[in-house]
Image (cartoon, grey):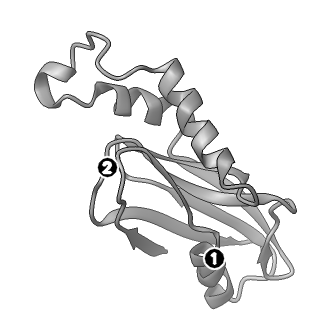
Amino acid sequence: MEIITLDTNQKHELIDITSKVNSVVKESKVKEGVCFLYVPHATAALTINENADPNIKTDIIKAVNKMVPEHDNYLHDSIDNNAAAHIKSTLIGVSEHIPISNGGLQLGTWQSLMFVEMDGPRSSRKIIVEIIDKR
């Protein structure tokens, strides 16, 4: 198991973590298996999507914010004013599984792994990476 740590700079942000995860996979020397990713945070998430066009990140944030508006009389806002971030994390999800074949992640041509920040900026956000060998 490896832990990737990163800092975020904006309230809502998608950060491409593909190269960091690829490094963990290569270091594991696993040729065939599964890469399991998990975010142990209640206001962050993981997703797989395109990274060739940076507008996709903006569009995803815009759509998620439209589905779950900030400050919509959420009960949790009376505690720490971030209920929308909790809901967004729940909708997007906190884990991903990617097959490993020939020692590499089997992502599509345009796919990248993205850490999704919904309550930033934050320091020391963590992504747990577990590599499971098929053998």
Label 2 amino acid?
A: Gly
> Left or right of 109: which side holds 24?
left
Q: Is residue 29 left or right of residue 109?
A: left
Residue at screen point 46% across, 65% down? 128
Labels 2 and 1: the sequence-earlier one:
1
Secondary structure category for the residue under label 1: helix
In this rendering, does residue 91 appear at all? no
Residue highlighted by disc 1: 19
Residue 102 shown left or right of residue 13 in the figure = right
Q: Residues within 10 Å of mark 1 (few under 14, many from 20)?
A: few
Q: Position of residue 69 (x, y in %)?
A: 41, 20
Q: Residue at x 36, y 60 (%)?
A: 8
Residue found 52% across the figure and 21% down from its top: 66
How many numbered dots are placed on residues in this image? Answer: 2
Residue 129: image location, x then y, percent: 53, 68
Identify residue type, mark 1. Answer: Ser
Q: Residue furthest top?
A: 73
Asked which quadrant contains residue 31, the reply is bottom right
Q: Give the residue pinned by disc 2.
A: 120
Question: Residue shown at 45%/36% (left/top)?
Answer: 89
- Label 1 near label 2: C-beta < 8 Å? no
Circle 2 Cα neighbour tier, 10 Å, few/some/many (<14 / 14–19 / ≥20): some
Residue 36 image-quadrant placement: bottom right
Kindly report which numbered mark, 2 or 1, lies closer to the viewer in this rendering: 2
Q: Secondary structure at mark 2?
A: loop
Does residue 72 sit above or below 20 in this rendering?
A: above
Quarter of the rendering containing residue 25:
bottom right
Choose between 98 and 20: the one closer to the eye.
Answer: 20
57 vs 17, nearest the viewer: 57
In the image, 37 versus 112, the foreground residue is 112
**Residue 1, image x and y in percent?**
49, 74
63 to the left or right of 43: right
